């Protein structure tokens, strides 16, 4: 018996296997529904804002984003040439098409173990973000604010639901999870913004010294005298930047697990990143690889259900459409693993209406796939946070913030149900 206890304790010391619980937690219906609702809100906001159609598109289909990624110095001439004679489309549509393509490229490169290609795709994504902020700043600020509001509620709810299920083996209801994230909305919303505000404030000091440096003769002396201060401030900026980028994934879980405010969440995330950087990197890489495998499994399931549905429908339809194309393929092309048949070749009004309705259903499947990715991301980082907290602070995995008022409300509503 003692040897069994010792072996169990030894296994418990290895926390990385806990990450393999992520799929079971992320696939929960309430989490998928929360992520799906958030996705719909963000997509709706993006589509509404796309009415402006501010992205220049050439007649050959090239967008200003593609030109910026390949030859950024030619972007002004491209916009000048095609602004009047070319086509325009929305920023959201342009960036969504780019991001989904890059996501698939990263997955393909990951399974080919082509880490150079992964780095290249991530660099392109960073460049796309720079393009977004530089050439569409007003749109970016408004849309990012909307997105952060939605993510604060959605991500906070998923993290809280995962934390309760992981720590206490409880399955909170959808309403309970959303209630927690709305109560802690300020903490969720402010946590990613505070480091950015601090970086901007510190950078402004260096900027002001640079402005003084324009004064003849005196300016260079001020810069030279202030140079130790500049380097000190630069050190703080570098430390905060690394902590914010590496610890961003832990901020929401800190609020969900410990009921932290935004400053405590930032402090905990920075502390865990700098205390266990290699362990943090290992956990994140493991979760990314495992997440990619789980995504392929879920995508295969979605492909299988669409392909089987199409195949059985095809058995009963042998009539061609007016354009001499199989009637089913005219409204719903045969699905493949990479394309579920979203674009048909409808020729009549009835086929157009049918193709549109089928397109909406297929979009819902795609939305659920993206919702799974969102749920997996927040669930995995919640488990990673619990594991790092155990290593750094020696806090038990089952130790989680519980509000006594929430317990009373849950008992009255009967929402929290032990597994």
Image (tube, rainbow, N blue to C red):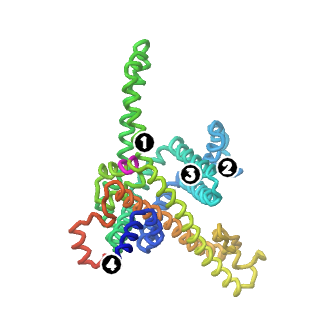
Q: Secondary structure at mark 2?
A: loop
Question: What residue did someone put label 3 on?
Answer: 53
* Marks 2, 3: nearer the viewer: 2
Q: Position of residue 25 (x, y in %)?
A: 43, 70
Q: Residues within 10 Å of mark 4 (few under 14, many from 20)?
A: few
Q: In the drawing, does residue 73 fall left or right of residue 197?
A: right
Q: Position of residue 259 (x, y in %)?
A: 28, 59
Residue at the (36%, 36%) spot, across then down: 201
Q: Earlier in the sequence, mark 1 or mark 4?
A: 1
181 or 171: nearer the viewer: 171
Residue 65 on the magenta segment? no
Residue 190 appears in the rendering: no
Q: Secondary structure at mark 3?
A: loop
Question: What residue did someone put label 4 on?
Answer: 418
User: Is residue 137 shown above or below 109?
Assistant: above
Q: Residues within 10 Å of mark 1 (few under 14, many from 20)?
A: some
Residue 324 appears in the rendering: yes
Residue 70 appears in which quarter of the rendering? top right
Residue at the (63%, 73%) spot, across then down: 355
Report the quarter where the N terminus lies: bottom left
Give the distance between the C-alpha atoms of the residues marked 1 and 3, in whole angstroms.
34 Å
Q: Position of residue 321 (x, y in %)?
A: 74, 78
Question: What residue did someone put label 2 on?
Answer: 62
* Marks 1, 3: nearer the viewer: 1
Q: In the drawing, does residue 194 fall left or right of residue 44?
A: left
* Marks 4, 3: nearer the viewer: 4
Q: Report the number of discs.
A: 4
In the rendering, which numbered label is found on residue 40?
A: none
Give the distance between the C-alpha atoms of the residues marked 1 and 4, in whole angstroms.
40 Å
Q: In the drawing, does residue 403 fall left or right of residue 232?
A: left
Magenta segment? 270-274
Give the distance between the C-alpha atoms of the residues marked 4 and 3, in whole angstroms.
50 Å
């Amino acid at each position: 018996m003692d040897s069994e206890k010792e072996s169990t304790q030894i296994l418990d010391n290895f926390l990385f296997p806990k990450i393999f619980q992520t799929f079971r937690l992320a696939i929960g219906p309430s989490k998928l529904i929360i992520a799906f609702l958030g996705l719909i809100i963000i997509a709706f906001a993006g589509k509404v804002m796309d009415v402006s159609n501010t992205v220049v598109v050439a007649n050959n289909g090239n967008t200003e984003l593609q030109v910026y990624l390949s030859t950024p110095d030619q972007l002004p001439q491209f916009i000048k040439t095609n602004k009047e004679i070319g086509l325009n489309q929305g920023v959201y549509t342009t960036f969504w098409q780019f991001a989904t393509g890059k996501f698939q490229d990263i997955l393909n490169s990951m399974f080919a173990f082509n880490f150079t290609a992964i780095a290249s795709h991530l660099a392109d994504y960073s460049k796309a973000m720079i393009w977004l902020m530089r050439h569409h700043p007003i749109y970016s600020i408004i849309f990012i604010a909307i997105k952060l509001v939605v993510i604060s509620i959605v991500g906070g709810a998923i993290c809280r639901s995962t934390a309760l299920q992981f720590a206490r083996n409880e399955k909170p209801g959808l309403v309970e999870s959303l209630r927690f994230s709305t109560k802690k909305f300020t903490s969720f919303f402010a946590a990613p913004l505070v480091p950015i505000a601090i970086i901007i404030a510190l950078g402004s000091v260096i900027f002001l010294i640079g402005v003084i440096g324009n004064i003849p003769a005196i300016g260079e002396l001020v810069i030279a005298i202030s140079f130790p201060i500049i380097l000190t401030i630069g050190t703080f900026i570098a430390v905060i930047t690394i902590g914010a980028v590496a610890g961003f994934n832990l901020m929401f879980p800190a609020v969900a697990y410990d009921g932290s405010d935004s400053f405590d969440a930032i402090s905990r995330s920075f502390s865990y990143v700098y205390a266990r950087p290699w362990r943090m990197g290992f956990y994140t890489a493991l979760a990314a690889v495992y997440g990619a495998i789980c995504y392929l499994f879920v995508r295969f399931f979605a492909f299988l259900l669409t392909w089987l549905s199409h195949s059985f429908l095809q058995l009963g339809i042998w009539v061609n459409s007016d354009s001499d194309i199989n009637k089913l393929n005219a409204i719903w092309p045969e699905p493949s693993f990479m394309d579920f048949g979203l674009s048909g070749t409808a020729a009549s009004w009835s086929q157009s209406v049918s193709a549109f309705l089928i397109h909406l259903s297929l979009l819902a499947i795609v939305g659920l796939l993206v919702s799974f990715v969102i749920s997996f991301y927040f669930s995995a980082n919640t488990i990673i946070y619990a594991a790092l907290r155990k290593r750094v602070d020696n806090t038990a995995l089952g130790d989680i913030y519980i509000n006594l008022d929430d317990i009373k409300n849950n008992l009255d509503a009967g929402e929290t149900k032990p597994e």
